[in-house]
């Protein structure tokens, strides 16, 4: 099996290099990436939407100075789009050109000509295998593939070679670093899981989310980043239809900065909840549970910061100052 020299020296090195690429990993993520790099194994990254699975692969490529090759999966993706296909148009042109030019060629000669590398269109999997420079292969949203296509993928990841009937076996120049992401919409095959190292990317802790906001939103005040992370963590503690993801946190923070906000209060939170939450019922629930007491205050007291009041809410939560790790899981 062709080997590749590792990109990183330790888990701490991974974490630092990813931070340099604006990706804030925790120890678990950095540990898995380090191991995958060392063992030459693919990483299967699973978790809720918008928690940084795709970005992990992209940031790893940036951190390693490697080229990113991406295969976006969808239902109906087939071998021709994932692996390779023959360039029919070019083949037809070649045949016609030979005829017009009166080239005296047997069919065998012609066949050998048009089923050769210049007529091959390489798709991401083959491209990653054949690359001679360092590459990171991202197979994004693998759970959208049909089971048969998953088997094809498995074959490539197991052998790091591709057999093309007309050409023979093309072997990998090196083992690329591979990330597969899944939103967990269906169970992946045992065989695929066995082949990969597993990494669950959950919602971040408020501390890490705050750091992500500071890293990704230029010019945001630390206090605001802190409040944003706290509010989002509190929202994830409610039973929402759709919990806000890191993407939504970043959209929210960016919108607040654009609006010139440098500190949150109940009113601003209420006015901008629709950036974080995508269901009317979720917005209403958040208003009731997080901002409930603001609603009951008189108009003169409306703009108080949404901090815990010290008394118990009838339905549970107010904005916490130290929301729990990880958010809720479903
Ligand atoms: N750990 C992180 N550090 C920095 N940015 C992050 C991190 N996790 C997520 N993001 C940002 O959050 C957004 C969503 O991430 P993405 O990778 O698209 O999510 P997923 O693939 O899990 O649905 C992106 O804009 C990404 O830059
Ligand atoms: Mg993604």
Image: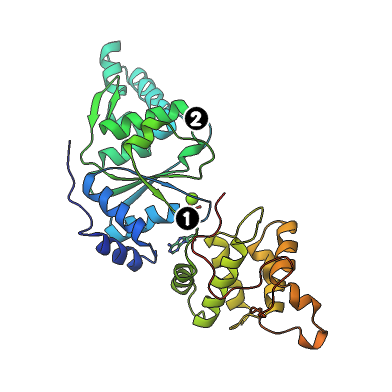
The quarter of the picture where the N terminus appears is: top left
Q: Is residue 282 left or right of residue 230?
A: right
Q: Is mark 2 within 8 Å of ligand 2?
A: no
Work out whether residue 83 can be spotted: no
Residue 315 quadrant: bottom right
**Residue sitting nearer the eye, 155 or 105:** 155
Q: CA distance from mark 2 to mark 1?
A: 25 Å
Residue 117 quadrant: top left
Q: Is residue 38 left or right of residue 236?
A: left
Residue sitting at the far bottom: 300
Secondary structure beneath dot 2 equals: loop
**Residue sitting nearer the eye, 229 or 251:** 229
Residue at image position (24%, 25%) is 169
Q: Is residue 248 left or right of residue 197?
A: right
Residue 87 x, y percent position in the rendering: 39, 29
Q: Residues within 10 Å of mark 2 (few under 14, many from 20)?
A: some
Secondary structure beneath dot 1 equals: loop
Residue 77 x, y percent position in the rendering: 48, 32
Residue at image position (53%, 82%) is 223
Residue 260 x, y percent position in the rendering: 61, 82
Residue to which mark 1 is pinned:
202
Residue at image position (79%, 81%) is 297
Residue to which mark 2 is pinned:
146
The structure's colour scheme is rainbow
Residue 160 vertical placement versus 306 (above, below): above
Residue at image position (26%, 34%) is 160
Residue 224 quadrant: bottom right
Residue sitting at the far right: 298
């Amino acid at each position: 099996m062709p080997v590749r020299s590792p990109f990183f020296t330790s888990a701490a090195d991974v974490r630092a290099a990813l931070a340099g690429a604006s990706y804030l990993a925790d120890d678990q993520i950095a540990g898995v990436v380090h191991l995958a790099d060392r063992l030459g194994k693919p990483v299967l990254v699973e978790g809720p939407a918008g928690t940084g699975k795709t970005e992990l692969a992209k940031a790893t490529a940036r951190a390693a100075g490697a080229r990113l090759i991406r295969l976006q999966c969808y239902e109906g993706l087939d071998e021709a789009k994932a692996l390779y296909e023959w360039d029919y148009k070019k083949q037809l042109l070649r045949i016609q050109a030979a005829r017009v030019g009166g080239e005296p060629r047997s069919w065998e000669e012609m066949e050998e000509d048009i089923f050769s590398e210049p007529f091959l269109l390489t798709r991401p999997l083959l491209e990653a295998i054949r690359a001679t420079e360092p590459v990171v292969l991202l197979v994004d949203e693998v759970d959208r593939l049909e089971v048969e296509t998953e088997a094809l993928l498995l074959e490539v990841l197991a052998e790091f070679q591709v057999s093309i009937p007309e050409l023979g076996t093309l072997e990998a120049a090196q083992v690329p670093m591979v990330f597969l992401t899944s939103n967990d919409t269906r169970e992946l095959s045992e065989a695929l899981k066995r082949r990969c190292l597993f990494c669950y990317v959950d919602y971040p802790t408020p501390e890490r989310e705050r750091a992500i906001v500071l890293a990704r939103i230029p010019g945001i005040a630390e206090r605001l980043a802190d409040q944003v992370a706290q509010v989002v963590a509190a929202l994830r503690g409610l039973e929402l239809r759709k919990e806000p993801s890191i993407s939504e946190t970043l959209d929210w923070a960016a919108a607040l900065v654009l609006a010139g906000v440098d500190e949150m209060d109940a009113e601003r939170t209420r006015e901008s909840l629709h950036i974080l939450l995508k269901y009317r019922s979720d917005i209403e629930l958040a208003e009731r549970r997080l901002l409930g007491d603001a609603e009951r205050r008189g108009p003169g007291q409306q703009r108080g910061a949404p901090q815990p009041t010290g008394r118990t809410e009838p339905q549970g939560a107010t904005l916490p100052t130290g929301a729990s790790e990880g958010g809720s899981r479903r």
